[in-house]
Amino acid sequence: MESSSSPAWAAFFASSMELVHRRFEKQVEQSPDSIAVISGDEHISYAELNNRANRLARMLLKAGVDGRGSKYVPTFKFLD
């Protein structure tokens, strides 16, 4: 039996994470105006959530976060 740190497990995990990303993008394309998140009185559509996620990704890249190691990321209020 393979351990959870084996290359095969890592490849499976990476492909699963990619699938989540692709599924979300597909959902955005299929029903951009459908509600994706409800937080208190705020309702966020898939399109808006995608826009916010892309904005956050650009901010993280600009801050030097590239996914290849640990980085300190200053916190900020993002959803407003």
Image (cartoon, helix red, strand yellow):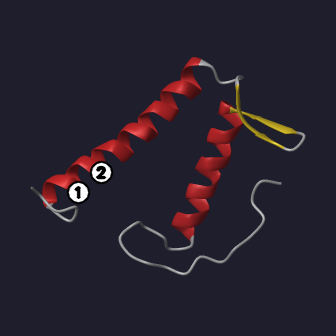
Amino acid type shown at disc 2: Ala
The N terminus lies in quadrant: bottom left
Query: Hey, which quadrant is residue 9 in on the image?
Result: bottom left
| Mark 1 to mark 2 CA distance (whole Å) | 6 Å
Identify the residue at horizontal 54%, vertical 26% (top origin): 27
Give the residue at the far front of this rendering. 1
Q: Name above or below for residue 54 compared with residue 20.
A: below
Q: Residue furthest top?
A: 30
Left or right side of 63 for 38 = right
**Viewer-closest of 11 and 76:** 11
Residue 73: mark in rendering: none
Picture coordinates of residue 61 (x, y %)? Answer: 51, 65
Q: Which percent across, then down, holds residue 41? A: 90, 40
Residues packed near mark 1 inside 10 Å, few (<14), some (14 to 19) or many (20 plus): few
Residue 53 image offset from top left, x and y in percent: 61, 48
Name the residue rendered at 56%, 73% in the picture.
63
Q: Are marks 1 and 2 in contact (CB under 8 Å)?
A: yes
Q: Nearer the viewer, residue 75 or 9?
A: 9
Which residue in the structure is indicated by mark 1? 10
- Looking at the rendered structure, the secondary structure element under dot 2 is helix
Q: Which mark is residue 14?
A: 2
Amino acid of disc 1: Ala
